[in-house]
Amino acid sequence: MENTGKKNSVYVNRELSWLKFNLRVLEEAEDPGVPLFERLRFVSIFASNLDEFYMVRVGSLFDQLVLKKPVLDSKTGMSSEEQLEAIFDQTKLILPRKDQAYARILSELSDYRVHPITPYELSDEDYEYLSTYFEKEVLPLTSPQIIDKHHPFPFLKSKELYIGVHIAGKNENAVRLGIIPASGSFSRVIFLPSRDGVRFMLVEDLLCLFADRIFFKHKIIDKTVFRITRNADLNVEDSTYDFDLDYREAMTELLKKRKKLAPVRLELRDAVNVNMMNYLCEHLELSHQQVFINHSPLDFSFVSALEGRLQKERELFFSPLTPQKSPYINPEERLIPQIQRRDILLHYPYHSIDPFIRLLNEAAEDPKVVSIQITLYRVAKDSKVVSALIKAAENGKEVKAVVELRARFDEENNIDWSKQMEEAGVSVIYGLDEYKVHSKLLLITRKSGNHIEYITQIGTGNYNEKTAKLYTDLCLMTANKEIGADASVVFNSLFMGNMVESSNHLLVAPLCFKSRIIELIDNEIAVAKLGQPALIQLKMNSVSDRVLIDKLIEASKAGVQVKMIVRGILCMRTGVEGQTENIKAISIVGRFLEHSRIYVFGAEERRKVYIASADFMTRNTERRVEVAAPVYDKRLQKELLDVMEVMFRDNVKARIQLPDGSYTHVRGDGEPLDAQAYFYEKAYEMAEQRFYSEPPKKKFHFPFFRKK
């Protein structure tokens, strides 16, 4: 049985479930069916995911220990200490697979004349080139330091690379440490002269190679590349928050503080002698459990530098795909009248985000538009969304934006945009004190004569042009008056500093969400107990809310068929006899990050369909402002049900959860079906159609075949 928490429990620990998800990411790097450079990119994604996991989740668990505020996992009863021990053990089991995947990819890249050069395989010519490069380009920019009684142990930045040099001292067992920062004004990747192919060395290897020239007066015993990961779990609600500061100023101060939090992980590139490891652990206040030995680079950000050198080798990459036009949108007609005729649904990245940007720009120019209100969580660096809002404000529209400054690791970007919007005349607020605003909601209010009209957009993903090409998300645009009225209540509440206490159509967390979901599940339980077919279908990123998990288990016991597509965390085991035997869960990890949320309750005429910004996680249902919107248009309901049906038939990228909590690839007897590839192929075909006035009568089917 997989290590998912307490034995014989139907529940799974959240952190261990997340590690299983990241292992599925790594499996993409091991899959020979994935283009070779894309496999290298998946190694990089795996490593980046793990970095953030240690900064946030492991950091949070350490906070519980340091503050002596033990919190038992609500699902498995594991203590903070037990969770950390299990995390460290699982990480050390997974890392060798990452190293092996990287080594295998490099070996195969040699067929494309890509050769990483290590200090142990240099020709005389290479050595001379690198020696000259080091002396001219790197050495003048290094800032080495020896640690002794006159030079205290320095502050080390989180995730920065350093060269640790063990220097001989008077006492044989004593450690004198030299440290060379491996980041600065020099390039991370050094490309060596080559008539054919790509030959390169990473700068940390170059510094190791010539460390003796830096510490030329000393005898070097050992040297290694290392880095630390610091806790980044810092919230504005901490007791250190200065309430005399503007909220944005407080966030700026907290970002500075985050960079100085305690280390939670030490990574070494290859093993070093015990004395040196003990020295580092002592000064960083880390246990040996928190030390991880890698046999591949500690930072994979260099991958992007290689990409530009290999563009001619197209077979190394995924085939280029371009988001397509929706066949339901007339490019020659203004968008607002089209939305007023019928609801429009965009499915990213298969559809382009351009119609949504077009909607904002139209609203900015429309003389009948009196206000635009929007919630912003993560936006692009060069955001067309924000530019449109600024243009609207400059045109005299009332523009209100709820900017969530606590969008982790996007805080600085959001702070910058909030300043620019305020300068342009946008009314900006930063959400509620104790609740992040995570909803994806836009409300355009128009006045036509004596009538008020609403255009409402509800999304599952951020207003971000970059991620709209990489994440699968949904964007619903509707002129439904009732939905618009509910959206108006949401914005009025936010700008008054209140939570939505009631709504008629939208499900709004934290007060009008979970109870409504429970009611919908209870309806299916009641139907099942009458002996009638009962069905729940869910698609989301993660499921960890204990109350909702227990309700789904209750539904399973009552005979409700529950089908789930959960990309990441799933804190229960499915298919367990007498408990979750009527629940099936798959996870799809592929070229695009599955991010859309779809809830379906009931079948046929009883069916209710929603799209949402929220996962079934406690943070979403209880500690965030989230919005789920009903999809009333029967055509759009059918589209969403088709999306679910195709994903459940995926037998290329889908993994099914087994009763022991582990995952295995779905293997069907039919033709290979990659759902993401299918949706893109369908988008290309449908883009040639024109359904501006009437829905299509022809049923389209485009199977996707993948070479095994």
Image (cartoon, rainbow, N blue to C red):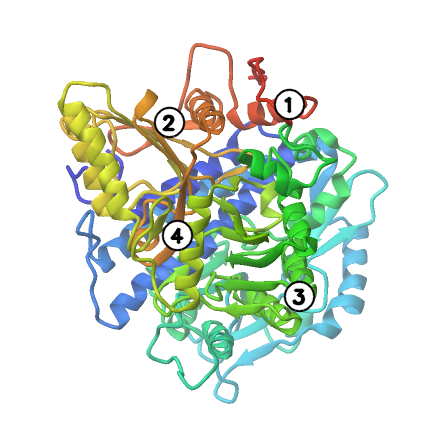
> What's the amino acid at mark 3?
Gly
Residue at image location 49% in from the left, 66% down from the top: 405
614 sits left or right of 449 in the view: left
> What's the amino acid at mark 4?
Glu
The residue indicated by pointer 4 is 626
> What's the amino acid at mark 1?
Met
The residue indicated by pointer 1 is 686
591 sits left or right of 134 in the view: left
In the rendered structure, which disc, 3 or 1, sits on the residue that comes first in sequence? Answer: 3
Tell me where residue 496 appears, x and y as whole percent: 40, 69
Cα distance between the residues tagged 3 and 4: 29 Å
Residue at image location 74% in from the left, 55% down from the top: 190
Local secondary structure at mark 4: strand
Cα distance between the residues tagged 3 and 1: 39 Å
In the rendered structure, which disc, 3 or 4, sits on the residue that comes first in sequence? Answer: 3
Crowd tier of the residue under label 3, counting other residues whose Cα lies within 10 Å: few below 14, some 14–19, many 20 or above: some
The residue indicated by pointer 2 is 664
Q: In terms of image quadrants, where is residue 102?
A: top right
- Above or below, 434 against 623 in this view is below
Cα distance between the residues tagged 1 and 4: 32 Å
Please give the label number shown on residue 396: 3
Which is more toward the observer, 180 or 124?
Answer: 180
Local secondary structure at mark 3: loop
Crowd tier of the residue under label 4, counting other residues whose Cα lies within 10 Å: few below 14, some 14–19, many 20 or above: many
Q: Is residue 201 visible?
A: yes
> What's the amino acid at mark 2?
Thr
Local secondary structure at mark 1: helix
Crowd tier of the residue under label 2, counting other residues whose Cα lies within 10 Å: few below 14, some 14–19, many 20 or above: few
- Above or below, 368 against 261 in this view is above
Cα distance between the residues tagged 3 and 2: 56 Å
